[in-house]
Amino acid sequence: MNILVIGSGGREHTICWALSKSPKVDKIYCLPGNGGISEIAECVPISVMDFDSIVEFVDSHKDIELTVVAPDDPLAGGLVDRLNEKGHRAFGPKANAAIIEASKAFSKYLMKKYGIPTANYEEFNDYENAKDYVSKAKYPLVVKADGLALGKGVIICNNVDEGLKAVKEMMIDSKFKDAGKTVIVEEFMSGQEVSILSFCDGKTIVPMVNARDHKRAYDNDEGLNTGGMGTFSPSAIYTPEIEKEVMNNIILPTLDAMNREGRTFKGVLYFGLMLTSDGVKVVEYNARFGDPETQVVLPRLKTDLADIFNAVVDGTLDKLNIEWSDEACVCVVMASGGYPENYEKGKAITIGDLDKDILLFHAGTKLQDGKLVTSGGRVLGVTALGKDINVAREKAYANVEKISFDGAFYRKDIGIKK
Ligand code: AMP
Ligand code: GLY
């Protein structure tokens, strides 16, 4: 079969790579793709939010049997709905289910209504009320923009001044545009974070192996929040007891809650979890594969990813046995100097003689006159499998050193924490 993947980052490169291993997949298109993806897929230069052109492209390519929508914006905007309306098969939630990520006010309402453990919160649409609340609240607390804000709409505030500044930036200065018109102010939680991605066909939900992300820019979790500077899988802190608690208290209740709300979820449902002293709580839901979690999860998948995508779309996930390798996986992100703030693009990338089994997932790269150059903040995800995390980490870092571009930086401590 031929498959179209929507998106252009390291996550999409990993999805294309996993699909390219399937004997059932003949051809992969990726829209718009990137420099690395172009080696395994035909890249289509259309923006992920240009729904008319995307639908037209799928209409005119009768060979495409499935479209996989990977990023949050087109999911929230209803690209799956648009494709379905034209009779095309698509992997990903419809807009009415993708709202579990696209509106934090909705996800908090859902968790409160169905007793799914999360931080206590208040929702505000009115600036004066929000101001009044944060003036009198206990600190630290967390102010969140309701809508999608590229992972930047969460501000941890340590005192009243910071709380007031955060609500003003979101509600008055429109720092996150409409995403910040409504804000959530929630209790600060402390604990270790784990990401659980799951396949869900609306009736059956199958968690993938766990992964841990490193959101801050620099070693020891210092610096600004980023889209993710590296990941590893599995984490030893996610014990079988915790896994059971999460399945019973969070994963199954969420599936049930979405169905009861008439928002059946089909696709990848991502649980951002915090292991607190008071049990596991949900930090956030995503309606898609995580990035860069996907880079360490899919290399451990033994089952054919095309079979899983088809089973999710057809509602037959209960018939599939999804298997994982016992190997560990580590992904180190190489980023452009200055990321996550201002950085330059167009730097030539030199890649030395990498070990044969290294997986080099491209995020912000493009081919310019046949040469690979940087085109984003996160540039490459250097990924290695190994018999345990230490082996995988050493292999990943040994190969990071063989890659260079002007201004490149990366964290040196990915996979050190448990
Ligand atoms: P989110 O976009 O909701 O995943 O938030 C981004 C990051 O902010 C999370 O991965 C956490 O590290 C942090 N965060 C979000 N909510 C809370 C909270 N209630 N308490 C502590 N940290 C939080
Ligand atoms: N790595 C976190 C995310 O994909 O949102």
Image: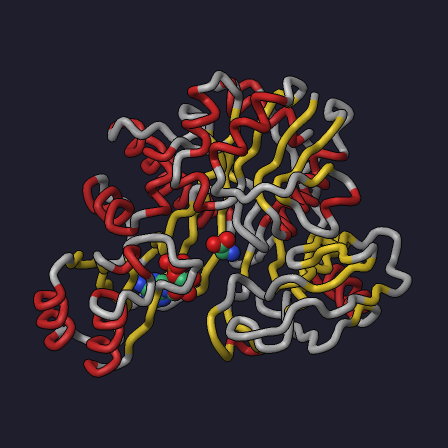
Camera-side residue: 232 or 20? 20
Q: Furthest-right residue in view?
A: 353
Camera-side residue: 339 or 203? 339
Can residue 1 be seen from the camera position used here? yes
Answer left or right for 273 relative to 106.
right
Count of labels in the image: 0
Rendered residue at 43%/33% (across/down): 93
**The C terminus lies in quadrant:** bottom right
Where on the picture, by quarter, is residue 395? Answer: bottom right
**The N terminus lies in quadrant:** top right
Vertical side of 365 occupied by 414: above or below: below
The image shows residue 206 at horizontal and vertical percentages of: 50, 33
Where on the picture, by quarter, is residue 165? Answer: bottom left
Can residue 317 be seen from the camera position used here? no
The image shows residue 144 at horizontal and vertical percentages of: 29, 62
The image shows residue 33 at horizontal and vertical percentages of: 65, 45
Camera-side residue: 91 or 82? 82
Vertical side of 219 occupied by 38: above or below: above
Vertical side of 248 occupied by 374: above or below: below
Answer left or right for 295 relative to 143.
right
The image shows residue 287 at horizontal and vertical percentages of: 43, 42
Answer left or right for 371 relative to 111.
right
- Look at the image and name its color scheme: secondary structure
Where on the picture, by quarter, is residue 415? Answer: bottom right
Rendered residue at 20%/58% (across/down): 121
Rendered residue at 43%/27% (across/down): 82
Rendered residue at 32%/53% (across/down): 147
